[in-house]
Amino acid sequence: MANSLTSYDLPPLASYSLTPLPALISPIPDKFLTLLLPIAAYWILSMFFHWIDTKDYFPQYRLHTPAEVLKRNHVSRSEVVRDVLIQQVIQTVVGALLGMTEPEDFMGKQEYDVTVWARRIRLAQRAIPGLLSLVGINAGGLAKNLAGSHPMLAGALLGGQSPSSTELSGVAAGSQGALHSFAAWELMAAKVLYHYLGPAVQFAVAIFVVDTWQYFLHRAMHMNKWLYTTFHARHHRLYVPYAFGALYNHPFEGFLLDTLGAA
């Protein structure tokens, strides 16, 4: 008896040909560009807000007065700039080392990856008849009733066996076989999963991991007296933060929080 989940019973995957991905800004390799752009954005944006601060624009929105900056900060602007630059150098070096372990970037495989997701959608549909039978629903009978008005839904209820996704064609002399193709909705759903939902989930997981890591490490810095006095107290010398002081930390704490946390 043939296995209904064998690859020859599924639509074929798209063929592809890989070509090297050109640099976004030639001649800078993308691996180095991803390290340089965050630093450039950091200083451009922080200098813009620093300019607003020094010119005393929008004073009604200030949380701290200029007098508080002079009185309560125990670190100079030059020291803040120095420590931020040290941390950015550490981040860049670690990022460059990690980049050396990654393979070269290629393009041309997107359509193949989309059809991989379309196959997964097709395979997921094959579980629907069995799941419906567990609650006493005849998937075949329901699909027959819906075939006229909702053919795509009927095909899904039958486990992906949709007339719109299969056509008969001769595969050898004197024989007939099934030449499968993906339904339009399967390809559309696969594109949404591949281009949008997948990256969105990856981004959300990454944010959760980094935020969780930083929260508990920051909490430990406050709860442990040695960690606080040795490393974290340096951060609190900047009581009224400058716009460019977001990364102001002890270099070791900054490495643990930001560099290692994101790596």
Image (tube, rainbow, N blue to C red):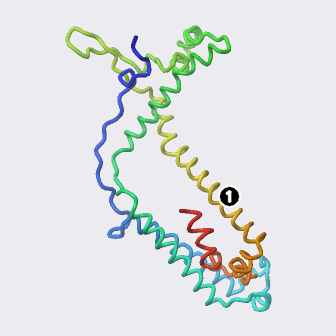
Asked if residue 110 is positioned above or below residue 148 in the image, the reply reads below
Would residue 101 be found to the left or right of residue 66 on screen?
left
Q: Quadrant of residue 69?
A: bottom right
| Rendered location of residue 7, percent (x, y) | 38, 25
Would residue 19 be found to the left or right of residue 232 on screen?
left
Q: Identify which residue is drawn at 38% across, 63% down.
A: 24
Q: Identify which residue is drawn at 33% across, 56% down.
A: 21
| Rendered location of residue 167, percent (x, y) | 36, 17
Asked if residue 249 is positioned above or below residue 102 in the image, the reply reads below
Q: Quadrant of residue 66?
A: bottom right
Would residue 218 be found to the left or right of residue 17 on screen?
right
Residue denoted by label 1: 212
- Number of numbered discs overlaid on the protein picture: 1
Q: Identify which residue is drawn at 56% across, 63% down.
A: 262
| Rendered location of residue 18, percent (x, y) | 30, 48
Toward the left, the furthest residue is: 173
Quarter of the image where the N terminus is located: top left
Binning the other alpha carbons within 10 Å of mark 1 as few (below 14), some (14 to 19) or many (20 upward) gives few
Q: Identify which residue is drawn at 48% across, 42% down.
A: 194
Amino acid type of the residue that numbered disc 1 sits on in the rendered structure: Thr
User: Which secondary structure, mark 1?
Assistant: helix
| Rendered location of residue 92, percent (x, y) | 48, 73
